[in-house]
Image (cartoon, grey):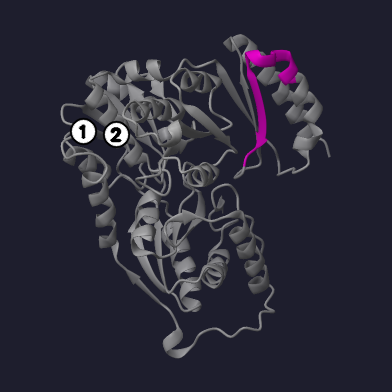
Amino acid sequence: MTLKFGTDGVRGVANHELTPELALTLGRAAARVLGGRRWLIGSDTRRSGTLLSAALAAGLATEGAQVVDLGVVPTPGVAFLSARESSPAAMISASHNAFGDNGIKIFAAGGKKLSDEIELQLEAELAVLSSHGDPRPRPSGEDVGTITHDPTLVDAYQLHLESEVVQPGALSGLKVVLDCANGASSAMASSVFTHLGAHVSVLHNDPNGININAECGSTYPRSLQDAVVEMGADVGLAFDGDADRVLAVDATGNMVDGDEIIGICAIDLHSRSRLAHDTVVVTVMANLGFHQSMASHGIKVVSTDVGDRYVLAALDAGGYVLGGEQSGHVIFRDLASTGDGMLSGICLLDVMARSNKTLGELASEAMVRLPQVLVNVRLAKRQPSLMEELTDEIQQAKDSLGDRGRVLVRASGTEPVIRVMVEAPTEQEAQSVAQSLARIVQERGAQP
């Protein structure tokens, strides 16, 4: 039994790679490494969620923890409650992946994602437990843990969104379409935005265990784009399966991604002297146009590795309040300890309402995007040495663009995929460089 943490917990095919046996043992390891008498567990709407939640809870209880099963709840809701209750917590979700996958994200007490050091300790403890050589006795008698169910705790998270992010009624007059991806936001998103004054229509909020992220949500926003135009709405918001990210659609059906959302909110906060240290945090995937725009507004940019955990670490290290990823993970650090799709959507719509500008106008003011091409090259298996082998070819591609563009090639932290990203002055040039590099990656990856 082996386990390696990726950029966002552990993930794999449910009941095949991520088995209940593995989840149970991970629960035991987590209880030993992180401690905590009381643990919270939430899940998204995947069929395998209850299976893995039960197994993880059993592992925690085996080590004496008192486990509270929250039921279906967005990942940021679990993080919020972890902070509110001062309890470690876990979320059963594979985020934007198809329903057959699942994952486990663990939060330290306070709603914080785990450090690399803690994850290594968890991997080591799991290896000990899996070897059947652990000499430590299990708790017995009154020291055995319990598992209870209390979905009403989630009400506190919903109340937070409805009353503590913006002023009541702040979104009055806005016509909004929400795409819940048949995921964890399905039960509460409409109520939250309606409570704040918006006129709400909802798509894909009827989860059945297998339709999460299926041609809907932030990874497939086509139906949302069409609905916004057909309904004459002001804006659309697309969440992913566990609602920790959001992408937006303007009134004409154009997508507004994480770079633009962060840019809009950064400029707004800066104009109100609320952007701490006049700085925003993004990953290396942020479009070059974002950097150029922030510089023109007097806003400094800190770049991190890909992964919202790295953005969060930089936010905390620098005392900054806003950061995120192009994919739609946006962190308002003074309001949350992780990315929150609904919270970010509320903040974005609040800027629209206060400025009396359309989302399209705000996005065009926030940045002028350089053409960007992203090619995902899927390999048969992970190849850790491949990136080093491609060093010369990557440098040649960078040299061909010079300071007119950017080249970024990186291995996915959750899949056997190499991502090739190229920005250039024209779409044609970006496509040419990206496809050429992708072919080389595919050829090298196929070699024995």
Amino acid type for the residue under numbered disc 1: Val
Element assignment for label 1 = strand
Rendered residue at 19%/32% (across/down): 198
Label 2 crowd (10 A; few <14 / some 14-19 / many >=20):
many
Q: What is the spatial separation of the Cα atoms under label 2 and label 1, in whole angstroms?
A: 7 Å
Label 1 crowd (10 A; few <14 / some 14-19 / many >=20):
some
Q: Residue 234: give its label.
A: none
| Contact? badges 2 and 1 (CB < 8 Å) | yes
Residue 108 lies, in percent from the top left, at: 48, 61
Residue 130 can be seen in this image? yes
Vertical position of residue 303 compared to residue 232: above or below:
below
Residue 238 lies, in percent from the top left, at: 36, 33
Residue 216 can be seen in this image? no
Element assignment for label 2 = strand
Please give the range of residues in magenta: 397-412
Q: Which residue is mark 1?
A: 200
Residue 349 lies, in percent from the top left, at: 28, 30
Vertical position of residue 160 compared to residue 40: above or below:
above
Rendered residue at 16%/30% (across/down): 172
Residue 193 vs residue 231, the one in the foreground = 193
Q: Is residue 202 left or right of residue 221?
A: left
Q: Which residue is mark 2?
A: 178
Question: Which quadrant would the N terminus be assigned to in this image?
Answer: bottom right
Amino acid type for the residue under numbered disc 2: Leu
Rendered residue at 53%/69% (across/down): 24
Question: Which quadrant would the C terminus be assigned to in this image?
Answer: top right
Vertical position of residue 203 compared to residue 367: above or below:
below
Rendered residue at 61%/14% (across/down): 424
- Dot placed on the residue nearer the N-terminal end, 2 or 1: 2
The question of residue 409 being in magenta is answered with yes
